[in-house]
Amino acid sequence: MQHFKQLPAVTRVVINLFALDGYSHKDIAEQLNITETTSRWHLAEARRRLKNALQLQQHKMVKYE
């Protein structure tokens, strides 16, 4: 949850609308006044950042065990 809160605001909104609320990129783009491509970029960026943060956290946990 901590990593999620550290995402930029628009990126966080896009991943919420897409992953949790089931909105399409077209719907997200219309709601946020951005392009569908930008919506896709924010989703990919959120996934990339969260994946990296979780991998780093996992690495730290393994290191200290």
Image (cartoon, grey):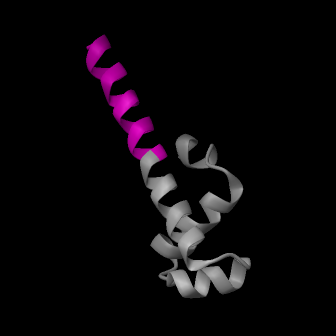
Is 52 left, or right, of 7 in this rendering?
left
Residue shown at 63% from the left, 77% from the top = 35
Is 27 left, or right, of 31 in this rendering?
left
Residue 39 screen position, x and y as percent: 57, 71
Residue shown at 47% from the left, 82% from the top = 22
Instruction: Count the labels in the image.
Output: 0
- Name the residue nearer the viewer: 35 or 14: 35
Residue 28 screen position, x and y as percent: 61, 80
Query: Residue 59 in magenta?
Result: yes
- What residue range appears in magenta? 49-65
Residue shown at 52% from the left, 79% from the top = 21
Residue 16 screen position, x and y as percent: 56, 68
**54 relative to 21, above or below:** above
**32 relative to 51, above or below:** below
Which residue sits furthest right?
33
- Name the residue nearer the viewer: 35 or 58: 35
Residue shown at 32% from the left, 29% from the top = 58
- Name the residue nearer the viewer: 34 or 47: 34
Is 62 left, or right, of 14 in this rendering?
left
The quadrant of the rendering that contains the C terminus is top left
Question: Could you tell me what secondary structure mostly forms the magenta stretch?
Answer: helix
Query: Residue 61 in magenta?
Result: yes
Is 10 left, or right, of 16 in this rendering?
right
